[in-house]
Amino acid sequence: MSNQQKRIAGMFARYFALLLIGTGNLYIIYTILTPLTISITATILSIFTTPTIVNNLIKITDSVIQIVPACVAGAAFYLLLILTLSVPNIKPVTRIKVILTSIAILFALNITRILFLIIIIKSTYFQTVHWVIWHLISTLFVVGTWLIVVKIYEIKSIPIYSDTKYLIKSIKNPKRKK
């Protein structure tokens, strides 16, 4: 198998993995992250109070926090996977490190966001703050996380664009064996 064939096969495998992960309304992501989000949040809250978990609810003193899919931010994690898997020329071990690092950073930021919202849940400004965090700050979390892993792992290629450029170049100038 030529280098070109290996690269195209690797590209196919990366994008196929993205399709599989994204199937069923991000079922895989939510199946993993929902219980983790609930249990980690409750564990941190247990430092200050005695939380009770019932399904996707965390009951504390005089409040009930419902962890819905939007709280888990599965689409944000999927976007990070898209960015990571759509970049060519990353060694498999490095790619795994990039994925784990980006997931860990975004997960920590997301738990911090949830805890902050729990702190202000009784505030008259809760809905406004929640909206701002959900629509603006969460986007910055994803962008910031991606920029951090790009810097840490010295990623030089551009997601999707570098693959597309390579494919177009391969179609225009195919290297044929005689």
Image (cartoon, grey):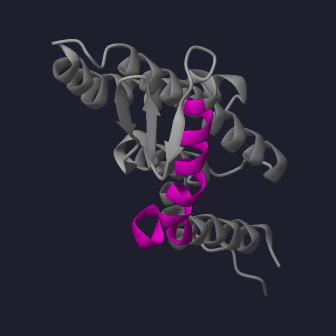
**How many numbered discs sit on the rendered protein?**
0
Q: From this viewpoint, is residue 113 visible?
A: yes
Q: Position of residue 158 (x, y in %)?
A: 52, 41
Q: Quadrant of the N terminus?
A: bottom right
Q: Residue at the far bottom: name it.
A: 178
Q: Is residue 25 above or below residue 61?
A: below
Q: Quadrant of residue 44?
A: top right
Depth check: 177 or 155 in front?
155
Overall secondary structure of the magenta section? helix
Q: Is residue 145 left or right of residue 1?
A: left
Is 41 magenta? The answer is yes
Depth check: 90 or 51 in front?
51
**What span is in magenta?**
19-42
Is 96 magenta? The answer is no
Q: Is residue 37 above or below residue 167?
A: above
Q: Position of residue 125 (x, y in %)?
A: 17, 13
Q: From this viewpoint, is residue 159 visible?
A: no
Depth check: 151 or 27 in front?
27
Q: Quadrant of the C terminus?
A: bottom right
Residue found at x 39% / y 24%: 140
Residue found at x 36% / y 34%: 64
Residue found at x 48% / y 53%: 55
Q: Is residue 101 above or below residue 12?
A: above
Residue found at x 45% / y 49%: 56
Q: Position of residue 119 (x, y in %)?
A: 39, 14
Q: Quadrant of residue 61?
A: top left
Depth check: 58 or 154 in front?
58
